[in-house]
Image (spheres, coloured by chain):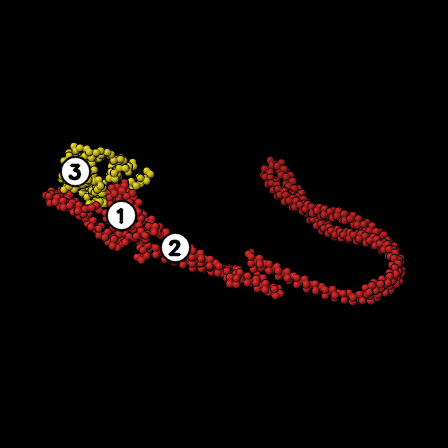
Amino acid sequence: MSRFLTLRRLIIFGPIAVLVVLCSVLGTYFYLYSYGATIKSMQSLSKVSAQPVLNLMKPSVGGGNYANIQDGNAYNLYTSTPDLIFFSVNGQTDLGKTPYSAIYLASEEKLWRTAYSDGYEDKLFKKRNKVAAGIKKYANNPKRLKKLNLMMDKITKELAYYTEALTMQAEVNSTYKRPDADDLKDGFYLDKKNNLLHLVLPTGNDAGGEIWMVLDATILSDTIFDVAMKSALISIICLIVASAISLFFSKQVIAPIKRITATMSELTNGNYDLDIEDYERQDEIGEMARSLQIFQQTSVEKIRIEKAQEKEQKEKERRQKEIQNLVNIFEKDSTKAVNTVAETATSLSISSNELEELVQNIYEKIKLVTAASNNTSENVASVATTTQQMSSDIAELTQQVSSSRKLVNGAVEKTKQSNELAGKLGEASLSINKIIEVIQGIANQINMLALNATIEAARAGDAGRGFAVVAHEVKELASQVGQATDDITVDISNIQNVSQDVISALAAVQDDIEKVGDYTSNIAMTVEEQNSAARIITENINTASAGVSDIDNDVKDIGSSMEQAEKAMGGIDKTALALSSQSDTLRSDISGFLTKINE
Amino acid sequence: MSIVFKITNLALMLGAFVIITLSSAAYAEGSNATMPEGWEEWPIISSGAIPSNDKPISEDLPSIVQETFKMYNWVNEGHGTAYNVRVNPAQDAGYKNGGEYEDISTAVLELTDIGVILVTEHLMDEPVYGAYTIDGKDMGAAHPSLAPEACLNCHSGYAEICVKGVCTSKK
């Protein structure tokens, strides 16, 4: 790639150049296409416009009303063709080879037939003269005169049309010049000077003929201008698009490449502390960035490894020195330690012996403790038995107190019942008093009756003596009843007093019994407390018994341990001797080892 | 082919109708020619039939005949009609000579199925036309195709075979 044709320039100006070329090609094509299409359109238009005339000149038709219709169709086509200036047809009809020609002028918006047979005008003049003569001849015949006037009118119109047609033909001939055959290309000629398009086409009927059309070519100029404007517009749009694309490429490609290049340069100079951008892109730039990133990471890793190796080497040296120092220290310290161990082993042996003696003493004491513990255990068991007995007694007592309580409650209940009965007794006494009062009333009345009977018996004299006896007896009885009721009243009064006393006594008894009940309840509560206390004591005794048993077991274990300790003391002693021996060996080995290290 | 022809036929009929309507406007008053007397006795010089409007017209026929068929096939509700061409014996010389007609009725085209006659009359050796029912009622204004102007346009338009407004082999 040359110095001039850089990638950046290629990316920026490449699309612009391509689009400019493309626009030029398209513009040219568009121009040619539009120009050609316009020409073709005009040619098609001319053929369509000529069609009614062609139909007129073909064999199946010739004139008459049909000709008028064709003329009308042609006229309509011409007037609806805005660019048409002039149209003419010259040829022969297939039927009879009659000359046929017509012209149309858009400026006049009128169609004229211009082909007339030889002597056509003379024939019209002759006809007119004949009709004029007829008018004179039939001046008095209104019917025929009317007909003749119509004929005259028709002839006059025909003559005027003929004259006008010839005039227009002459005007057309002076205004427009049919192009030469050499000037025509595919049947058309563009008069650029006058901005006119000439189309010359064969009529296509058997007898032959020619159609000549002149159209306003402004449409072509307009087309050219329109195409030029559109091309320019498209070019501008393309330029903008191309610039946008270039800008896009510049931002998307050139800028990242420049960044990557700068980054590579920095990496080459050994500056690895960089942030590499664009590595997240999924295109080639992204791949480049990622490759660069890998290169950066590899380089950084390499440097790190080198530094680490250097550091490790230094560390090794440092450790070597340090080991040497440590060896020296170790030599000194180990010698000292071995000596100390030896001394300690000796001391340990001595201490072991002393400790053995101490263990022996403890062992003896433990035996004593074991014996005491056994004794305690027996005592506790005895207490437990006693406590259980006490608990049993308390339970019995509780049972009895409960029974007493029930009895007291029963007595209270019965006392209450007695009290109620005594009350009822008092009430019954009161009722009896009322009965007695009734009886006393009855007795008084009987007494009064007996008195009256006595009085009546006295009035009766002798006849009433017997009755008087009876009345007396009744009076006696009434008196006895009164006496009896008084006695009863006294007795009942006594009963009531007694009942009242009984009630009072029962109330006192009830109070006492309730007090007894309260005492019984207190006893029950106290017994319950005692029972609880006894239960707690039993539980504590059981706990104490278990504790004593555990102590006993522990003491046994201690004794066993002490036996083992005593055995171990013997082992320690032996070990201390072995240690002393081994320290000598160690001293010798360390000395040999250090000698070898220092060699 | 048939459909194209029918469409063309229809277009021509419509066109003829428009033109005849426009051209006959000035003649709305009726026939120019007078109803001839005794035309029934005139000799028939040719006969034929105007086909119904649903039948194609042969292109081999003379153009004026084609146009006549197209112009009048609407009659009899489109079923066409038989016709006779009768020439006034008094005009026999002019007819045979192709001119120098007397100022009287010259010929009739009798449309037998509808009872209408198309009359050609000459006045100062120039044709005038009219249309009547066989009982004398003027039909010149009844339909554009029956207007005198329509007849005149047709005969003058086909000047190759129409001489002095009458179709003949003489020129």
Residue A125: assigned label: none
Q: State whether discs 3 and 1 lie on one chain.
A: no
Quickly name the residue at label 1.
A90
Disc 3 chain ID: B
SS assignment at label 1:
strand
Whether pointer 2 and pointer 3 mark residues with C-beta atoms closer than 8 Å, the reply is no
Residue A354 image offset from top left, x and y in percent: 89, 61
Colour that chain A carries in the picture: red
Say if residue B141 shows up in the picture: no
Distance, label 2 to label 3, CA atoms, is 67 Å
Residue A555 in the image: above or below residue B89:
below
Q: Would you say B73 lies left or right of A226 here?
A: left
- Asked whether disc 2 touches disc 1, contact meaning CB atoms under 8 Å apart, the reply is no
The residue singled out by tag 2 in the image is A31
Three-letter amino acid code at the position of disc 2: Tyr
For label 2, the SS is: helix
Quadrant showing the N terminus of chain B: top left
Q: Nearer the viewer, residue A232 or A447?
A: A232
Residue shown at 39% from the left, 52% from the top = A33
